[in-house]
Image (cartoon, rainbow, N blue to C red):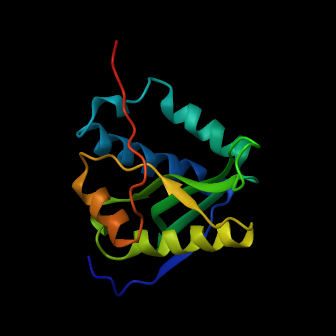
């Protein structure tokens, strides 16, 4: 694929949601090869679609479009820590996905810039995300974008 095609980054609309779910499905399948915890439930697509529909006005959902085809999306939201902290509000990037054919061509970076602008407009100065350590492509992307690890998550299967 040539990157000469024009990439349009824009806020998602309700008519984009089915295509966002399709991209999310590909994203989850990609992650499940690194960790089976990402395996989706039987009704995952419907549940994710409902979440997007119900929250579209509050979340930062941006899409990357090339030739009227969605090739990526970023899902961002705001979060708040308890009132015992001086800095309470922060941004959370829940998902950033670019379809396999278009990865490594700067689209993820463009989506991240749009989400960062959205956060800044909301007065958010700290952005967090979760990075699957076993996914080398994601780890490299987020490090290159200037995200520094600050806390390790741990889990135990019982």
- Residue 84 image position (x, y, % from top left): 73, 43
Report whether 37 appears left or right of 81.
Answer: left
In the current view of this chain or complex, which residue is farthest to the bottom? 4
For the N terminus, the image quarter is bottom left
Locate residue 40: give its quadrant: top left
Residue at 73 percent across and 72 percent down: it is 121
Q: Quadrant of the C terminus?
A: top left
Pick whichever, 139 or 97, lies toward us: 139
From the viewer's perspective, is 141 left or right of 13? left
Q: Position of residue 146 (x, y in %)?
A: 41, 71
Image point 63% across, 74% down: which residue?
117
**Which residue is found at the position 31% from the left and 57% from the top?**
138
* Residue 116 locus on image (x, y percent): 58, 70
Q: Is residue 80 visible?
A: yes
Q: Nearer the viewer, residue 61 or 149?
A: 149
Judge whether residue 67 can be spotted in this image. no
Residue at 42% x, 57% y is 97
The percent coordinates of residue 89 (x first, y second) are 70, 54
Report how many numbered discs are placed on residues in the image: 0
């Amino acid at each position: 694929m040539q990157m000469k095609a024009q990439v349009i980054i824009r806020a998602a609309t309700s008519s984009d949601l089915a295509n966002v779910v399709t991209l999310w499905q590909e994203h989850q399948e990609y992650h499940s090869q690194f960790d089976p915890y990402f395996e989706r439930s039987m009704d995952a697509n419907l549940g994710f679609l409902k979440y997007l529909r119900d929250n579209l006005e509050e979340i930062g959902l941006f899409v990357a479009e090339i030739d009227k085809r969605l090739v990526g999306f970023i899902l961002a939201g705001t979060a708040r820590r308890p009132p015992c902290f001086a800095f309470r509000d922060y941004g959370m990037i829940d998902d950033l996905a670019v379809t396999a054919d278009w990865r490594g061509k700067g689209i993820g970076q463009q989506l991240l810039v749009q989400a960062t602008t959205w956060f800044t407009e909301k007065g958010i100065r700290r952005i967090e995300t979760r990075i699957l350590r076993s996914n080398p492509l994601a780890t490299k992307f987020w490090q290159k974008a200037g995200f520094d690890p600050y806390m390790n998550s741990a889990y135990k299967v019982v």
